[in-house]
Amino acid sequence: MTYFKAFPARVPPSIDRSAIDGGDGGGLPLMLKADQPATMTVRVCGLPAPVVRWYVGPALVQTDRTPTTVAQRAASDDEDSGVRAVKHSLTVDSVTDELEQGVTVVATNDVGRDAISFSVKTYKGTDAHTVVVVHAGGVC
């Protein structure tokens, strides 16, 4: 008789790029209103759960070990492996020109690494609060 030992799935991190650049790398910068709060959110998946680091320019500004929320199951989520995308967010109290250095999100686990960078432009406007959701379709 042959016995098989089940090993948990191991999946490298993946960050959804669809809302940032349409998936083709040629996206427009995020437009954020100066002097207002803003939240940037990405969908990330991987097993074991990735650690997500946020950088503004070269400076590390936040490390997430726990997701902001678990994303609703997307059609592309892999039900067999149990991989599910989760949301990680960076909130700034007041948008400044410092964000124009660019924002980079890096997701790592013991299986691999994924990163995405995007440019930010600030503007003066009339909206009171900006929420930028950097995701659209499924990632996993």
Image (cartoon, rainbow, N blue to C red):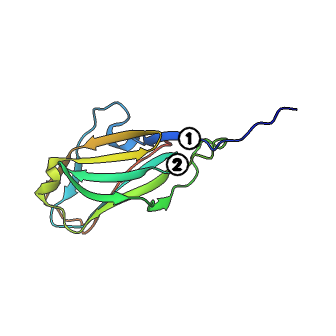
* Residue 52 locus on image (x, y percent): 38, 52
Going by the numbered disc 1, the residue's amino acid type is: Arg
Q: Can residue 37 be seen?
A: yes
Locate residue 79 relative to residue 43 in the image: left or right.
right
Above or below residue 43? Residue 37 is below
* Residue 30 locus on image (x, y percent): 25, 48
Locate residue 7 relative to residue 59 in the image: left or right.
right
Q: Residue at x 44, y 41 (%)?
A: 14
Locate residue 88 relative to residue 129 in the image: left or right.
right
Above or below residue 69? Residue 113 is above
Q: Name the quarter where the N terminus is drawn.
A: top right
Q: Quadrant of residue 26?
A: top left
Q: Residues within 10 Å of mark 2 (few under 14, many from 20)?
A: some
Locate residue 27 relative to residue 46 in the image: left or right.
left
**SS at mark 1 in the image:** loop
Find disc 1 in the rendering and name its residue: 10
Going by the numbered disc 2, the residue's amino acid type is: Pro
Q: Of the two numbered discs 2 and 1 on the same chain, state the one appearing first in sequence.
A: 1
Q: Residue at x 52, y 55 (%)?
A: 71
**SS at mark 2 in the image:** loop
Q: Residues within 10 Å of mark 1 (few under 14, many from 20)?
A: some
Q: Quadrant of residue 18?
A: top left
Find disc 2 in the rendering and name its residue: 48
Find out whether the residues at labels 2 and 1 contact each other: C-beta distance under 8 Å. yes
* Residue 79 locus on image (x, y percent): 65, 44
User: Which is nearer the eye, 113 or 104?
Assistant: 113
Q: Residue at x 33, y 58 (%)?
A: 63
Q: Quadrant of residue 81?
A: top right
Q: Can residue 140 be seen?
A: no
